[in-house]
Image (cartoon, rainbow, N blue to C red):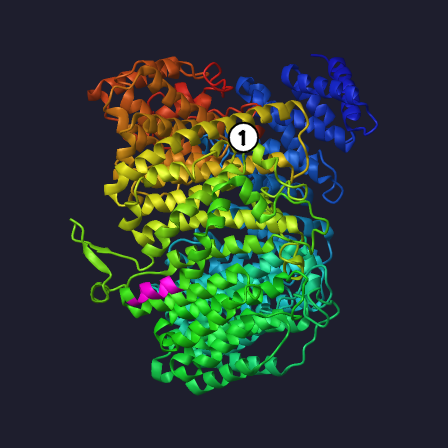
Amino acid sequence: MSAEQVSSLCEQLVKAVTVIMDPASTQRYRLEALKFCEEFKEKCPICVPCGLKLAEKTQTAIVRHFGLQILEHVVKFRWNSMPRLEKVYLKNNVMGLISNGTQNILEEESHIKDVLSRIVVEMIKREWPQHWPDMLKELDTLSKQGETQTELVMFILLRLAEDVVTFQTLPTQRRRDIQQTLTQNMEKIFSFLLTTLQQNVNKYRRMAQANCRVGIAALNTLAGYIDWVAMSHITADNCKLLEMLCLLLNEPELQVGAAECLLIAVSRKGKLEDRKPLMVLFGDVAMHYILSAAQTADGEGLVEKHYVFLKRLCQVLCALGSQLCALVGSDSDVDTPANLGKYLDSFLAFTTHPSQFLRSSTQITWGALFRHEILSRDPLLLAMIPKYLRASMTNLVKVGFPSKTDSPSCEYSRFDFDSDEDFNAFFNSFRAQQGEVMRMACRLDPRTGFQMAGEWLKYQLAAAVDIGPMNSKTGEGLCSIFSPSFVQWDAMTFFSESVISQMFRTLDKEEIPVNDGIELLQLVLNFETKDPLILSCVLTNVSALFPFVTYRPEYLPQVLSKLFTAVTFEVIEESKAPRTRAVKNVRRHACSSIIKMCRDYPQLVLPNFEMLYNHVKQLLSNELLLTQMEKCALMEALVLISNQFKDYQRQKVFLEELMSPVANLWLSEEMQRVLSDPEAFISYVGADNKIADPVLEDPSGLNRSRISFCVYTILGVVKRARWPTTLEEAKAGGFVIGCMPSGNPIYRNPCTEQVLKLLDNLLALIRTHNNLYMPEMVAKLGETFAKALDMLEVEKNAILGLPQPLLELYDSPVYKTILERMQGFFCTLYDNCFHILGNAGPSMQQDFYTVDGLASQFLNSAFVNLNNIPDYRLRPMLRVFVKPLVLSCPSDHYETLLCPMLGPLFTYLHVRLSQKWQVISQRSILCEEDTADDNPESQEMLEEQLVRLLTREVMDLISKEDGVHAAAFSLLVDDEMMSTDVTPPSSAELTELGKSLMKQEDVCTALLITAYRSLSWKDTLSCQRTTTQLCWPLLKQVLTGSLLPDAVTWFFTGVLKGLQTHGQHDGCMAALVHLAFQIYEALRPRYAELKAVMEQIPEIQKESLEQFDSKLLNPTLLKVADKRRKDNFKRLIAGCIGKPLGEQFRKEVHIRNLPSLFKKVKPSLETDVLENNEDGEGLTALFEP
C-alpha cells in the first residue's frame, strides 16, 4: 500500500461524496457515486488509511464525516477478521482524533462528534474489558486535555450506556460482561460525571460558553445512567447529586437537562427502603429551589424553552407525589413531610396554570393523594379540597382551542395541539379524568362539593345569556358550542353531576341535605329557555337532582311534565326545515332521561303510571309530533314500569293494548305485500323516485316512518319486557311455568305472544332487505337514490378514524339531504331488525327457540343473498344477531337450531374472507409496482379496513362459539411472552357447542381452514387472537381421528406462513412460535412429513434439526425444560420469521464473545450452531400464495 494509492483513492472518494451531496447532481451521477462509495466500504483493503486521511481536520465537514463513517463500517463489519496490530493501529488513531483531530468544542459540527463517539463505542463493545482493560483510564486522561475532549468522552459514556442497557443491541454474554464491569466501576464513573459537572458549572458561571456545552453533555450522560444504576449512587454523599440538580434548576442553559435528570431519579421504582432518601426533596432547600425555578420560568411569559422546562418540573412534582404516596404509611416508617403544605401549594399552582396540558398533568397525582389511606386524612390535604374544587370549576370550562384567542390557554394550546380536533379529544379525556378526581375529593368532603355546585347552579340560572361573536345556525340569538354561556353551563353541569352523585354515595340517608336539594330542583324546573344547548344542560341537572325526589315524591309530576315538554321541543314551532342535531339531541335527551328514571326508580314512578301512560298516549295520537325513535323511547319507559306490576296477566293485557296499533299496521294486507316483495318495498319507501328538491321534498317519508315505528316498537318491547328478578315474586305473578331437568325455573315473558305473532313479517322484511342488494334490484332504485344502500359518510369516517369537524356536530341538520335520510333509514332498519332477533332469545327463551323450523326460517331470511351483501352490513348481522343468539341458546337446541344454521354460515364466511384477502394481497403486490393512491379516504382503504373488521368479527364469533372457556383466558400476550411463558394453556377446551359443531365434517373443515388460513392474513389483531384462542383447541379436537398427512403439513405450513407475515410483531410472533412448537411436538412422532416441511425453511441448520428431532422421538432424552426446547425450536425456524421492512436488508453485525470474565455458563444445546445463522428470505417454495 503506497501513499499515492491512498491519495488517489481519497481524491476519487472526495469527488464521489461531493456529487452525492450536491443538490444539482443528476440522479444517475448520484447513484453511480453512491455505488462507488458503498463498494469501496465493502471491498477495499485499504479502508483504514483512507478513512483516517479523509477524517483529517483540513477536510470539509462532509468529507470528514464520510471518512469517519468508513472507519465505523470497518469496526462494525470487518473487526473479526482484522489482524491484531491493525486493530491497535486503528484504536490509537481514533483516540488521537479525539485528542487533537477535531475543531474546538464550539466550532465542531455535532454530527462529527456523534460519529466519532460511535466508533469508540463500537470498539468498546468488541474489546472491553478483556482486551482493553485501561479504557476508562484512557478516557479520563483525554478528558483532562480540555472541554472539547471532555464533551466527546461524555458522548462515548452515554452511547455506551444506551447500547448496552437501554437498547441492548449486543449478544447476551458481551452485554453481561460490559454491564457488570460498568457496575463494578460505577462509583468512579459517577464521581467523574459529578466532578465534571461541578467544575464546568463553576466555570460557566464565569461566562465560559464552552463549559456550558460540557455541562449539558454531562447532564445528558447522567440521564442515561440514573435510570438503571444502583440507587446508592444517586443518593450517595448525602444526596449530593440531587442537591446539585436542584441548584441547576435556576441556571437557564442547564435547567432542562437538570430537570430531566431529577425526573428520572424521582421516578425510580424498586425497594421502598432504597427510595427513602428521595424524601430529601421535600426538605426546605430542595423545595425552595424547585419553587423559585417554577416561578421564574412562569414569570417570563410564554417562551417555548421555559414552557418545556415547566412541563418537566410539573412531572418532577408529580413523581415526587407518587414517591410520597408509596413511602408514607408503608413499612419504611416515613412520616408525612413537614413541607407537605408547601408542596401542595406549588402543585396547585400547576393545576391553576393557564396551560391546559399542565393542568391535566397534575390530575393523576391529586387522585393518588385523595385516595391515600393516611395522607387523605391529613388536615393540610383536607384544606386543599375546596381549593382543588374551585380550580376544577375553572378547568372544566372548555376554552383554549388553538385556533381561538378567547382565553390565555389558547396561546399554550398552540404549542401542544395541532388542531382544534386534537385539543377537543384531549380535553374530553382530561374532563373525564377530572370527574374521577373530583369524586374522590368529594368522598372526603361531600358537603363542600354540593354547596359549591348549588352556588354555581344558582349563579348560572340567574346569569344573562352571552352567545359570543358566533351565531348558531339553529336560530337567531342561540348559543353555539363555543358561546361563553354554553361553555359555562356545560362545565357547571358536569361539576354538579359528578359532585351530587358522589354525595348520595357517601352520606348516610339522614345526612342528605334534602331541603337544599329540593330548592335547587325547583329552581331548575322553573327555569325556561328556548336554547337547545342550554336546555340539554338543564335536563342533565334535573337528572342529577332527581334522587332528591325519592325523599319528596310529590315533586315527581313536575319533573315528568318538564321532561315531556322537552320531548316535543322545537326552536320554531311548526317549522318545515329539517331539525338540527342540537334540537334532536334535546328531544333524545329528554326521552332517555325518562327511560333512565323508569329504569332506576320504577317503584317511585309506579304510582304515577296512569298519568305517564296518558301523557304518552296523547303524544302518540299525533303521528307527526314525534320521530319514531322518540315514540318508541316513551313506550320503552312504559314497558319498564309495567315490569313492576309483577303480574303476568295484567302486564300481558297492557302490552297487548300498547302494541295493538303496531300489530294492526304490521299485519295489514298492504304491509304484508310490501314487506315480502323487494320491488313493492322500494316503491313504498320512495326509493324509486327522482326528486327535484332533495332538501324539502319527501313524499314517502310517512311510509318509511310507519315501518320504522313498528320495528322500533317491537325492539323496545323485546328488550325491556321482563319477569321479576326474584323467584318468589315471579312465581306469585304467574311468570314461572315449570322447571328444567337441572332444576332451573322456566320463565315466560308477557310479550311473547304479541311478538311471535309479528315474527313472520319481520323475517320477510329481513329477506326483502337482503334481496335489495341483488343487481337487478339496485337497478330499480331512482336516480336520486342510486346510492341509498351505501354507507353513511359518518360511518365511513368512523371506520377510517377521521375526526368529525367540531361545529358541524350541533349546527347541521341530522340528515342534510333526502338521500342521506334514505341511507339512514336503510341502515337503522337493517340493524334494528337484527337487534330484535338478537334480543329475542334472552327475552322469550324456550318460546323462541322452539318456534317451528326456526333454523330454516333464519336460513331463508337473514342468510339469503349473502354474496351481494356488503361487508358493512354483514358485520352488524354477525355482531348483533348471530353472536347473542349463540351465547344465549340453551344446549338442548344446539342440534336443532345452531348446528344447521352455523354450518352453512361458517362454510360461506370462510370462502368469502379467503377471496377478499386474496384480492388484498394481490392488490398490495400490484401497488408495489404501481404507485398507490395517496388519498386516505380512497375506496380501497375503506374496503380493506372493512375486511379487517369483518375478519375480527368472524374470529370473535368463532371463539365465542367454540368458546374456549373464558376463564382459561385472561390472556395478555406481551412482548416477553417467550421468556415469561404467557402462552395459551394447553388445557384450553372447547365448549359443548364447539364440540357439537366439530362433529359435523363440513363445519369442522370450515372452522379449521378459516382459523389456520387467517394466520397469514394481514391483520395482526385477529392473528394474535386466533393463535392464542382458537387454533390449538380446534386442532386438538381432531387429533384423535385419522388426519391425512397433507392436512397436517398444511396446518403446520399455515402457522409458518403466519410467522412470515406477522413475525415482526413480538406478541404475534411469540404466540405463533408456541403454536408451531405445540403442533410439531404433538404430531411429529406420527407424521414424518413435518420434518420435510422444516427442511424447507431457509438456512435451517440440518444438524440441529436432526438433534432436535432425535430427542423429540426418543422420550427418554426429553429432559430439557419445555422453555429450553421451545427456544431451540424458535432458533430452528428463525429463517421463516418475518422481519420489519427496515431490517430485511440490513447487513448483520457480528460481535464475538470474549473469554468469560465470570464463572462458566453451561453451553446450551446447539446454540452456537444456531446463533451464527443469517436471516432467510422466507420459506421460498412453500410460501408462494
Q: Position of residue 150 (x, y in %)?
A: 64, 43
Q: Would residue 792 be found to the left or right of residue 748 on screen?
A: right
Q: Is residue 651 magenta?
A: yes
Label 1: few (<14), some or many (≥20) within 10 Å?
Answer: few
Which stretch appears magenta? 650-657
- Within the image, what quadrant is residue 535 found in? bottom right
Q: Return the residue nearer the eye: 1011 or 1173.
A: 1011
Residue 986 in view of the camera: no
Main secondary-structure element of the magenta-colored stretch: helix
Q: Position of residue 62 (x, y in %)?
A: 75, 31
Residue placed at 61% from the left, 45% from the top?
Answer: 687
Q: Return the residue nearer the eye: 934 or 896.
A: 896
- Within the image, what quadrant is residue 641 found in? bottom left
Q: Is residue 238 above or below residue 917?
A: below
Q: Would residue 338 be found to the left or right of residue 88 on screen?
A: left
Q: Is residue 6 above or below residue 1012?
A: above
Q: Position of residue 922 (x, y in %)?
A: 57, 24
Q: Return the residue nearer the eye: 208 or 466.
A: 466
Pick the quarter of the image with the N terminus: top right
Determine whether the residue tagged by mark 1 lies in a helix, strand or loop. loop
Q: Position of residue 782 (x, y in %)?
A: 65, 41
Q: Is residue 104 above or below residue 13?
A: below
Q: Is residue 437 magenta?
A: no
Type of residue at label 1? Pro
User: Which residue in the structure is indicated by mark 1?
Assistant: 1140
Q: Return the residue nearer the eye: 848 or 318.
A: 848
